[in-house]
């Protein structure tokens, strides 16, 4: 959302359209985070499953909205899904692993590399770098999928989000 914050500020001198779009996406993202956090606090047996199914529903609705010509609404639903996604690894109201933002992850990786160079644990930076590589890989896969199927490629993400709860139970 830092990119949308920048777009909101940079776009303001040129009119309200770009600023309004960016701020709306930020509001939808925050709203999705609120929903995900509330779902996680409801005492479900498998809070992650409920959150993943809500993400799947939001992405499916985004595809349907786009198909109905409601592109703006589809973008808001997608932003809400990404906000909700960040609550999957929440403990005691705090996000333990941020899934859609990487600046902090790269900073932690750099700090752990510095620690290793200074004699600390040699491999503490690896999990942070793997998370960043995962986001990069996902963005590349998403770009190819979008190139082939446009916004309808979100159906794939919705299916993955819907299937993951079953896989998580199998892994446990």
Image (cartoon, rainbow, N blue to C red):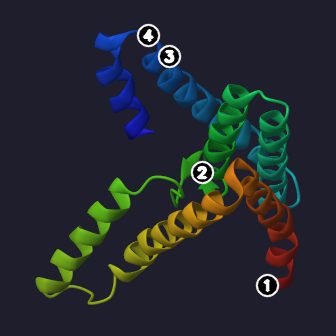
Residue 11 relative to residue 47: left or right: left
Question: Quarter of the image containing the N terminus?
Answer: top left
Q: Earlier along the polypeptide chain: callout 1 or callout 2?
A: 2
Dot 1: what SS? helix
Residue named by callout 4: 16
- Give me the C-alpha separation between circle 1 and circle 4: 48 Å
Crowding at mark 2 (Cα within 10 Å: few <14, some 14-19, many 20+) = many
| Residue found 85% across the figure and 39% down from its top | 64
- Residue 169 position, x and y percent, is 85, 76
Residue named by callout 3: 20
Could you say which disc has been placed on residue 171 in the image? Answer: 1
The reply to whether discs 3 and 1 touch (Cβ–Cβ < 8 Å) is no
Dot 4: what SS? helix
Residue named by callout 2: 86
Crowding at mark 4 (Cα within 10 Å: few <14, some 14-19, many 20+) = few
Dot 3: what SS? helix
- The quadrant in which residue 163 appears is bottom right
- The quadrant in which residue 160 appears is bottom right
């Amino acid at each position: 959302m830092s990119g949308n914050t920048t777009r909101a500020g940079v776009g303001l001198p040129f009119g309200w359209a770009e600023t309004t779009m960016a701020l709306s996406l930020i509001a939808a993202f925050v709203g999705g985070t609120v929903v995900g956090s509330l779902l996680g606090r409801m005492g479900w047996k498998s809070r992650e499953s409920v959150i993943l199914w809500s993400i799947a529903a939001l992405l499916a609705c985004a595809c349907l909205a786009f198909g109905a010509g409601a592109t703006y609404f589809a973008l808001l639903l997608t932003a809400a899904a990404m906000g909700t996604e960040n609550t999957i690894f929440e403990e005691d109201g705090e996000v333990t692993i941020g899934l859609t933002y990487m600046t902090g992850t790269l900073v932690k990786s750099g700090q752990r590399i510095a620690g290793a160079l200074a004699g600390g644990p040699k491999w503490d930076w690896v999990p942070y770098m793997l998370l960043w590589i995962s986001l990069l890989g996902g963005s590349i896969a998403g770009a190819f999928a979008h190139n082939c199927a446009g916004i309808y490629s979100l159906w794939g993400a919705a299916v993955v989000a819907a299937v993951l709860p079953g896989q998580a139970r199998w892994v446990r």
